[in-house]
Image (cartoon, rainbow, N blue to C red):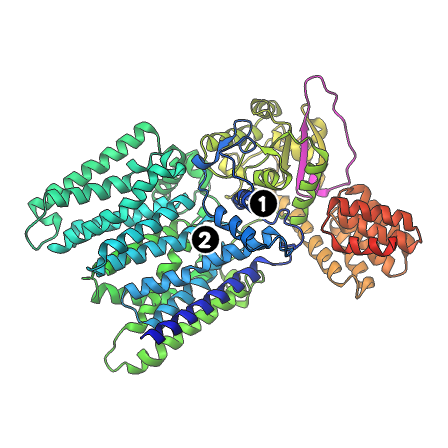
Amino acid sequence: MKFRSIIIGVVLFAIYLVSIWYRVRLGKNQDYYDSRDPTAYYWTENALQYHYAELIARGKSIPVFDPMLQAPDGVKIFENLTILMEYPCGWLYRFLGLDENNILFHTWTIIFIAGCASLGIFAIYLLSRALGINHFYSILAGLLSSFSLVGVGRSTFGFLNEDFALPFIIFGLVGYFFAINNSKNRIIFAIISGICFLISLCSWHFSRFVFLTIVLVSVFNLWFFEKGKRIRENAFVLFFILLTPFLGSFLAPVLRTHLYFISTPFALGFGTFLGIILFEPKAERPLIFSAQGLYSITIAVVFFVASIIVTGILKTETEYLHVWSLLINKIKFFGIKPSNPELLDYPARSLWIEAFNSPNCVSFFKNLFPIIIPAIFGFIYLLKNRFSESVIRILLALCIIFFISYLLIERMGVVNNYFISILSVIVGTIKLKKGQIFNKYLAPIILMIIFLFNFYQGYHLHNPTSYIKLLRNIFGNEIAQEIYNWRLNNVELVRYIKYRTPENAIFLSSFGAGPLIFTYAHRATVLQPKFEVRNCQNRVKEFLESIYSSEQDFYNFCKKYKVNYFLYDSKILLDNSRDGSRWVAAKMKIKSGDAAFLFHFFPEDLKHFELVYQNNYYRLYRIIEENETKTFLNFAYQPIYDLKAFGNQTKEIEFFDDRYTKDVIERIKKAKILLQRANAILIKNPEQAYQLMEKSIALYPALIGSATTLGIACALSGRIDMGLSLCQKEVETNPLFPLGHYNLAYCLYLKNNINGAINELKESLRLDPNFSPAREMLKQLED
């Protein structure tokens, strides 16, 4: 028995290591990851969490109050954010001495989060064992959950709280189920379960909704299904599970601030326990069918209603209004997002975007096919044959709830994934009459084929497989229109902000871009993506109302929050999809006098804003004070900011016509692809790279890196003077682009201008100290 346990432990650990490798490989995709430069690897809330983890990694403390986040008011960090995973991530980086081994922190975070998410393998294995599933199928359940497309999709390029919290939620269920099934160590397992739930509550805001679901299911199981002594036993289990999170909510600032100890899970759970203790039914029937039981249920309902009333009066759930509003409207519209945003209230609109949409057909089949088929059979089998068991009833209820939640909110797929995996392996435990061949051979073979299919789809996450292409051909693309942006735009923007703006400047941007400025440029930002932070949602609403109004209204908004710079991104105007800010603002028609229109097309007509930087995705504006004179700078021509490129429209139009946006965006995308292909073959075949770059520039002339790539292609083909001229043009257009200076140095070297080359290399290293090719070339020239 001990030997078998060792073998199982070794197998699970081996799978765990493979899972880490699998996820790290996806996270190191070359289009997003640069081992020597962490800038702009993370985005939105991921970047925010990365920032605080990096403070720990550098031996600093996370500030109790951060004036730079949601400036100028600042944020009380521990009272508003779920700060937990940042500590082990930062501590381990220091403990392992990774900085001394030249492993940058962003590389470590990819490994760390892969390790956290992969803990789900052990959790699912143990949960399966708690359900009576044998070792082989329990291991297979872990494989199916950890290597599924939905399991790795959100984790890739993410530093997400959910990847840290979800395994602890499953471990909490493990302790819960073992507590129900094990009379000897019931209290110990219940306390362990409570500790795991507390960790998840402290590390992920959304955990409280998952926790509430588990408590609701447990209480309903006690009310409607448990009989006799099982009622009292399971009530005690629920009490000790709730006890640790309840006590912890007095200690954890993020829970204490919101008075989580009076929230509905505790009120309902403790109320149910108290009712059962006071009015323990004697008959062998469920509580709902006995007089004593009805008394106990009444006490629970009173506690529950009192909690709702008190939390409503104290407004402890105000920051979660958007979540409840979303759920209500999802039910109201059967999960189908209305084309008219005005049919929804603002809190629902603000959240009903991107990952909070219902999955479309492509997403559904991509994430759940073919595993949904054995899962359905597993569900039916449990319902028909094992419904009398407490843990099975709770499991089935959670499966139904989280599956419906996934149909309403695609993001819930990460939770649903665990339960679908468990249900699917149940088919291997079904004992069929004359079905030995199925039990022994067909079931495991089918499940292994599903695992290999999932593994292959996830392995090629960044390049659509034939299956994904087939789904898109049948159902259409899952993304209607995308305003393309690339990491290089973000990197060069950050570099400009760091080198060309005052350190005490306050920046306004879309809330998703705020952490980019906050984390990598170390500047104060007005908006950020953590909607749970007090007043965050009101600010975002004000921003959207003013950006789609007049310039004066938007200027007043900027003055209210003491903004010095405004970062405009193209999605503000060009994204007319149901995931864009125009939809959230219920402003699908844009007038030619709206601030967003002027920021995009006519910065020269703005009275209070001065354009200081731009690339093909961003425009950065400085707010002009009353006594200042506006300066007009010359920038390279960008077709995306030329109204004539959009169907020859003029500023005299009443409303902006969106029909031409797709063509302009496709030109940028195709030009970028050609630029990438040219860079890939630049050294081996400079002449072909030159031809590709001519096509790229013909499509879109002003991508960062276009001129310097064409210049090096010329230089390597023997046209040194032309190459030098093009590289000089790149540096003039993008003076903070390290590669531009490096390539210019190479051309100067070919012209025997050694001093000029050395100066360019020094500038390149000043802008990017980790740029090793520049350092090596500089060393050669100086020697």
In the picture, the quarter occupied by the N terminus is: bottom left
Regarding mark 1 in the picture, which secondary structure is present there? loop
Where residue 162 appears, as percent x and y from the top left, is 44, 50
Where residue 360 appears, as percent x and y from the top left, is 45, 54
Q: How crowded is mark 1: few (under 14 residues within 10 Å), some or many (20 or more)?
A: some
Judged left or right of residue 109, residue 302 is left
Instruction: State the separation of the CA atoms marked 1 and 2.
Output: 23 Å
Read off the residue under disc 1: 58
Viewer-side residue, 146 vs 13: 13
Q: Report the span colored magenta.
A: 615-641
Residue 477 shows up from this direction: no
Judged left or right of residue 88, residue 59 is right
Who's the residue at 87% across and 61% down the image?
717
Above or below: residue 361 compared with residue 239:
below
- Amino acid under disc 2: Asp
Who's the residue at 48% across and 58% down the image?
115
Quadrant of residue 437 within the rendered picture: bottom left
Where residue 636 appears, as percent x and y from the top left, is 78, 40
- Amino acid under disc 1: Arg
Q: Does the magenta stretch include residue 619?
A: yes
Where residue 103 appears, as percent x and y from the top left, is 62, 55
Q: Residue furthest right?
A: 752
Above or below: residue 725 compared with residue 436:
above
In the picture, the quarter occupied by the C terminus is: bottom right
Q: Does the magenta stretch include residue 559?
A: no
Secondary structure that dominates the magenta span: loop
In the picture, the disc for residue 163 is: 2
Who's the residue at 85% across and 51% down the image?
745
Judged left or right of residue 203, residue 753 is right
Q: How crowded is mark 2: few (under 14 residues within 10 Å), some or many (20 or more)?
A: many
